Amino acid sequence: MFRITEERSFDRLVLKLEGRFSAEGIAELDTCWHAAMETWDPESIWGDLSDVHLTDAAGQEQLTRMHRAGVRFLTRGVFMPEVVREIERSCRSFRKKVRSCVS
């Protein structure tokens, strides 16, 4: 099972993901995320992954796209913090490659 809920405050929108985030949930998250970007600055959007128990490669790719656009993540436990660290490492590597291509 996978669920997304929105939690709004005056300065941020939190997309809270719960359950198993896999390829089946990507379309739902993508719809919520793009709708949020119409009214929120991407850096004001947070993804709460605290209650995500598992993600597959397709889910991780979606989270990477979101991170590259400016979304930040909240995590806890052992598994998801490591997934987010891997996403952050890949994004840093991606930025270095882009800078070297532009230079």
Image: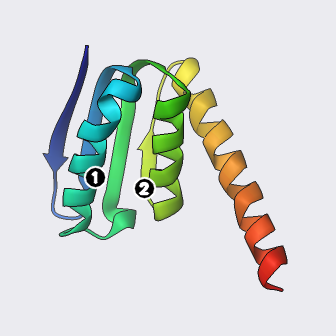
Of labels 1 and 2, earlier in sequence is 1
Identify the residue at horizontal 71%, vertical 47% (top origin).
Answer: 89
Q: Which of label 1 and label 2 is nearer to you?
A: 1
Quarter holding residue 95: bottom right
**x 32%, y 63%: residue:** 44
Q: Front-most of 44 and 33? A: 33
Residue that mark 1 sits on: 33
Q: Residues within 10 Å of mark 1 (few under 14, many from 20)?
A: some
26 sits left or right of 61 in the view: left
**In the picture provided, is 81 more to the left or to the right than 3?**
right
Residue positioned 51% across, 19% down in the render: 77
Residue 53: x, y in percent? 42, 15
In the displayed structure, does residue 39 sit left or right of residue 30? Answer: left
Crowding around mark 2 (Cα neighbors within 10 Å: few <14, some 14 to 19, many 20+) is many
Q: Amino acid at mark 2?
A: Val
The residue tagged with tag 1: helix, strand or loop? Answer: helix
Pick the quarter of the image with the C terminus: bottom right
Labels 1 & 2 near each other (Cβ < 8 A):
yes
| Above/below status of 17 relative to 38 | above
Write down the quadrant of residue 42 in the picture.
bottom left
Q: Residue furthest bottom?
A: 103
Residue under the point 56% across and 28% down: 57
Query: Amino acid type of disc 1?
Result: Trp
Q: Mark on residue 71? A: 2
Q: Position of residue 7 (x, y in %)?
A: 16, 44
